[in-house]
Amino acid sequence: MENKLKEPFMPPIDRVDGKLKVTGAAKYSAEYNIPQMAYGVMVGSSIAKGIILSMDTKAAENAPGVLGVITPFNIEKPAGYNIETSGNISATKKGFNVFDDKLIRFSGQPIAIVMADSYERALHAATLIKVNYKKDSFQTNLEKAIPVVKPLEGNAFKDYTRGDVNAWKTAPVKIEAEYNIPIEVHNPMELHAITVHWETPDKVLVYEKTQSLMDTQEKIMELFGLKKENVHIITKFIGGAFGSAFNVWPHAVAALIGAKQINKPLKVVLSRDQMFMNVGYRPQSIQKISIGAQPDGKITGINHEAISMTASYQEFTEGIVNVSRMLYDIPNVFTRYKVYPMDLSLPTWMRGPGETTGAYALECAIDELAHALKMDPLKLRLLNYSDTDLEKQRPYSSKYLKEAFEIGSEKIGWNDRHPEPRSMPEGDWLAGYGMGSGVFIGWRGGAQVGARFTADGKLLLQSAVTDMGPGTATAMTKLAAETFGISPDKIVFEMGDSSLPPGIMQGGSGTTSSLGTTVNNATLSLKKKLFELVKNKAVFHTETIHDVKFEDVVFENGQMMLSSDHTRKMSYSDILESAGLDNIEFIEETKGFNNVDYSTYAYAAHFVKVLVHPATGVIKMEKIVSAVDGGTIVNDKTARSQIIGGVVGGIGMALMEEGVVDNRYGRWVNNNFADYHVPVNADVPHIEALFVNKPDPILNPMGSKGIGEVAMVGFAAAVANAVFHATGKRIRALPITPDKII
Ligand code: MOS
């Protein structure tokens, strides 16, 4: 591909929006103030399932400052509510429109929005609503649901078979184990928030926390029957999302309906406790893995069966068992995935959706097998390394997991590990080393980028994309600087606005791959346009070159010059001036890439050292090395932050995070940050993030593959395996809390 990144790469750059973020100047969706602003507070159901018989909203409506209360009893339904979804669509696919009916599907389901002239007044009035329910029996306990509830059916739940499903059973060495992961929540620092301003009855301006401007715009167009140009979404900054901000959640729809009804700008911010049940979560899972191997360590067969959950009203699926089909070179594979509808809110994608869950089980099972074989777990992984994708029957476009194993194991000192569990005491503590690997698909979607290069030497790039934290504008700025040959401080990457050329969602580890390709192509187009303007100038013609070709010139330091003679050059500004132009402006569009001949995956090799205190069960993360094959790393500094962030999420998953629902009431117990534990600085040691940094030759012109999710995939297994190595105790239910150790 043309316009490839050249070595030596430009050094990494700082976050272009770093100063705005740390000084508080960056504006988040709850921070826009519009004259006449009203504030909305959501009221949630106090029962898990049933029907609302009546609601007494009089006291709330009469409370000081209240501008309106919307419930299922008085809602003016938007046009989109009445569109019948085709045919006999099953109940579990329908979804649920806020205030559309009086059914209660989960505890905490929004049943009213109270709007007032101040947040405090809305909050107070919300407490005055009285609800009369008819309760139904419900099921929020996955274990109890399995024997009595019918799992979902459809293509996503077809068994996968390769070779002999019973191969593992007849193998001389085998293990069978069950692994449990509780509900986990994203709960980013920024609360989900939306500010709505209906400028006319048919035109709305929305500041919304979203990972996808385009999808949010489309959803709002559908709901209210609006034209595209009349739905303007702005998301300049996001304070973390991890997958929670793809959907237009019920509170956002309520805000849109409410603002319209009271005819005032309206702001709705979820409270922290509401975040646990209104913006998705990683569903609970129960996974059974059985593996059989020859005494020399060659794995002959694997069965991986996963059970998970979704809401009663909408299907959510993720590729939990997919990792077992392709991470290792195993001839005989069986996978099964079952999802049970529960009386809980809808789960959604959460960092490494599917893979993070599946790799935890698979990578613990591999460690268990290594122990049964009395073989080093790294050696076992290398022995069963897959060089082609056996599931899709095609080669990898690149796979440098071996290299990641090498640099990671070297850095943590894996070779000094004594293989026996409980054999490495350090004072009162037991030390343990563990590893786990991760995999996540690399892909590339289509995107548009607007480009305007002006005679003052500045380049403006624009795309409707948002950034939940990875540093998208920073990576794109560096990429443009590198490929166009100008300094990054001459470049502005504008984003976070649906009126810009349509970009791509932020997520699936695909933003840099997708948008980067378009930026890359935009700078290539720009160079070609500059070239066309001055190719006939005498300065580019020598005794040997009469008819200068694009291939004969290079673009560096703001100059176009002959490759063969760098003194024959023109600055980009002079080129515009000589052509009598103030600027060059165009929109670059790239289509998505349908990767049919190759499988592209990013890989991670996580190595950890833990210290376990046997008397108290306290676990300390002592050392962490995560080595990643993400192809070419576009901007090392922000990429490193991605790995560190994923690893911190992995520490939470391994040791702390557990969503607890009281199944007697179907209600969350620990929906607050005092009781739902996440890692704080003191829980996190220095994290060494290493990159193989070799280009993928197929996926995109940068050679990058994506790293956001793989950073977390397989990490929790590394911790669980290290705890086993330290203590000899195999804890198969996350999180690994002290009580499980003692
Ligand atoms: Mo991610 S789960 O694509 O935000």
Image (cartoon, rainbow, N blue to C red):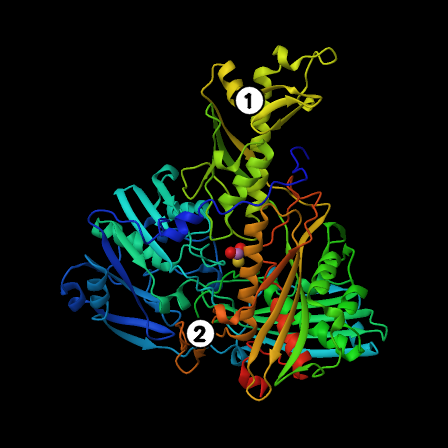
In the image, is the residue at mark 1 within 8 Å of ligand 1 by its beta carbon?
Answer: no
With 160 as the anchor, is 264 left or right in this view? left
Label 1 belongs to which residue? 571
Residue 248 in picture, x, y percent from top left: 41, 54
Nearer to me, 132 or 400:
400
Percent coordinates x, y for residue 223 in the rendering: 37, 49
Asked if residue 77 shows in the view, the reply is no
Q: Residue at x 45, y 57 (%)?
A: 240
Q: Considering the numbered disc 1 on the image, is that residue within a helix, a strand or a loop?
A: strand
Residue 14 located left or right of residue 234: right
Nearer-the-camera pick, 298 or 137: 298
**For the residue labelled by badge 2, is the local secondary structure a helix, a strand or a loop?**
loop
**The N terminus - image quarter:** top right
Horizontal side, residue 515 vs residue 266: left or right? right
For the point 19% across and 49% down, the residue is 36
Q: Which residue is mark 2?
A: 676
**Does 739 appear above or below 342?**
below
Q: How far is mark 2 from mark 1, CA to CA?
A: 58 Å
Frontmost of labels 2 and 1 is 1
